[in-house]
Amino acid sequence: MALCYYVESIIFYKGIILLANARSSLPRNVCLISAIMVTMMAISGCNQAVVIKRPDNIQRLVNETLVDGILSTDASMAVTLGRSRTLSIWNVATSQLLHQWSDDDFDDTNYLLALSGNKQYLATAGKQKISIFNLETGKLDIRWPAQGFNPDASISSLFLSQTGSTILVGMNDGSITVIQRSSMTMSLFKQHSAAVNHIELSNFEQQVLSTGLDGDVHIWATYNGELISSFSRPQRITSVSFDETNRRLFIADALDNNVIIDTQTTQPVSHLDYLERYRYFRQALFTNHGNNLITATSKQSVIYWDASSGKELSHWDITAYNAGTTVFSMVIKPNGKLLTLSSDGALETWSL
């Protein structure tokens, strides 16, 4: 707080000096009011608590910017896809490289990743091809083309189920393919009017959560595509997340419309008290049985929220090695700490 008053004083006196230089052209009462306003802005800026966090641990896995990266749900494995198109599997605890493939190992240039919940399978996607790797053997399991209703459509999102038996493929024409690996059957659904930018299974894999650039959030039946519930936002969806019980759903769009919804009543629980131009949430994660929410912005900021009130509890920045650094993936470790993987390929552990 002492630092805050110090900053206020500096701002106040600098404001007085600037206004004094201009007083020959401004009425005296205007100068006085302006000086008071400068001070009030300084004070109000200091009323917001800023928490400066340092990571408990940091390790950079690669020395290049990533195209995509993902963490396993138990925080033990990291997958990185660098701009060199090198695909790597890492042990988080030891930073040991487990598997690695180069761009020459693929028919199509990859830009999307998905990891099964049991860490046995890894899916990669190019524009129109999907590859599934068995991580126990490190070998390619299957590869096939993906297609939407528009034959020229390209892949825009990807998801693997807990066991890797179900694969969800979203396309930029708004279509979604549900693939069952055991029977090698595919079902194609048209759920959105624009590119699908997020898909995942929920409710014991009986339902699909999908979002698109059309601003729509749909929850629908996995086996027949029947719509169960739907939410619409003014702009493209940038982030979405279920809590552990699928009772609360967080939705964020590109215009700072950030809401937590009770999926049973479809009513808002809270709206996040957040407004910052040109920044949006690209990652979100519920924790503490849905009572708290963690979000990552399009820049380096990570914010910790009270989910019931929508009030910010703390925020901090991840370590940036390059311009445009952002969070690609984040999970809660077994010890309750947060693990983040950045677009710089850096793993950081945070105490909440």
Image (tube, grey):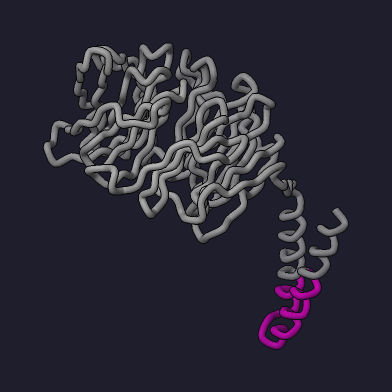
Name the one closer to the observer, 296 or 337. 337
Q: Which residue is at a point 28% across and 48% down the rendered structure image?
A: 104
Q: Is residue 299 magenta?
A: no
Give the quadrant of residue 238. Answer: top left
Which quarter of the picture shows residue 142?
top left
Specify the quadrant that holds the C terminus. Answer: top right
| Vertical relation: 74 (above or below) 163 | below
Q: Is residue 216 visible?
A: no
The magenta stretch spans which residues? 12-32
The answer to whether 20 is drawn above or below residue 284 in the figure is below
Q: Is residue 30 above or below residue 249?
A: below
Left or right: 154 in relation to 215: left
Q: Position of residue 95 (x, y in %)?
A: 58, 41
Residue visible at 81% across and 73% down in the picture: 13
Identified at 29% across, 27% down, the residue is 141
Is residue 39 found left or right of 285 in the rendered image?
right
The relative height of residue 281 versus residue 18 in the rendered view (above or below) is above
Foreground: 150 or 311?
A: 150
Seen from this angle, which residue lies furthest right? 2
Residue 333, percent from left and from top: 62, 28
Residue 30: say if magenta: yes
Residue 209 drawn at (x, y percent): 37, 23
Q: Which residue lies furthest to the bottom in this view?
A: 24
Q: Where on the picture, by quarter, is residue 122?
A: top left
Q: What percent of the width, then of the height, locates residue 335?
A: 69, 26
